[in-house]
Amino acid sequence: MFTHEMIASFNELELTLYNYISKNSDKVAYMRIRELADETHVSTATILRFCRKINCDGFSEFKVKLKMHLEETKRTVINSPQHSITEFFERTLTGDLEEKINDAAKLIAEAESVIFTGIGSSGILAEYGARYFSSMGKFSVYIKDPHYPIHAKFRYNSVTIVLSVSGENPFTVTQVNQLKQEGSKVISITNNKLSTIAKISEINLAYYVTEEWFQDSNVTTQVPVVYILESIARKMKNP
């Protein structure tokens, strides 16, 4: 609800308001302007100026937006594990995923090295993928810093495996584009084939599961990613 630009524009009194609201948002959503002024020891004029800085015409509009924000953050849409996995198999394995796994395994088998990249939970799985592929005899590295310099000898005759649920993370897009321009072939594993990362990849493996959120956190299942990674590695070892 509060952007970085908004917070940076607050003066000392407005920061006092911001800090109070952040800690007591459930309470503030039902307070009158005079009550909030008394609790925070600021004037009603300061509160109205604060509201205008966060693009609200007045305190009433601010409370409406605050209530909507609270409802949004409390929203929980989490399916059972069985539902998510069944959805993956029904939607994906009836398509051409197996053929793409074979193509990816062949491309990787012909490469000298594999570079894994991803951010957040995708980064954790990228690290797992690098370890799993190395265990299968293919030299692999995991790059978690999108600005980390990658030596030319690792980029030469390499394959980059990029993991991203949305396929739109700007840091990952920039890194993948750089690696692609430097000659590394790109294999992406995303939740759909229409994302930016999917479109700039030589091979995209999309798993199509419903995105799930708990408050502000993306908790979409990553089981399909593990399945795809292990399937590629095993196909690479036993074509």
Image (cartoon, helix red, strand yellow):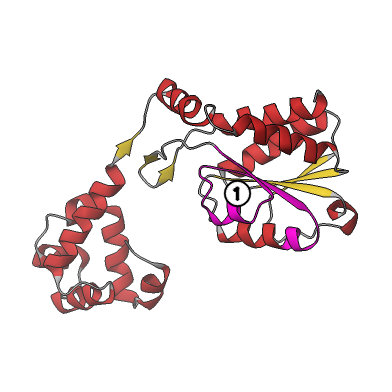
Depth order, front residue of 204/73 = 204
104 vs 163, left or right, is right
Give the image quarter of residue 177. Answer: bottom right
202 vs 56, left or right, is right
Decide: is 54 above or below 29: below
Depth order, front residue of 60/15 = 60
| Residue located beneath label 1 in the image | 119
Q: Amino acid at mark 1?
A: Ile
Q: Quadrant of the N terminus?
A: bottom left
Decide: is 195 above or below 106: below
Depth order, front residue of 68/53 = 68
Residue at figure coordinates x 79%, y 41% from the top left: 107
Would residue 195 be counted in the magenta stretch? yes
Q: Residue furthest right?
A: 153
Residue at figure coordinates x 87%, y 54% from the top left: 156
Question: Residue 36's spot in the image, x, y percent?
Answer: 15, 64
Give the image quarter of residue 63. Answer: bottom left
User: What are the residue bounds of the magenta stretch?
Assistant: 178-206
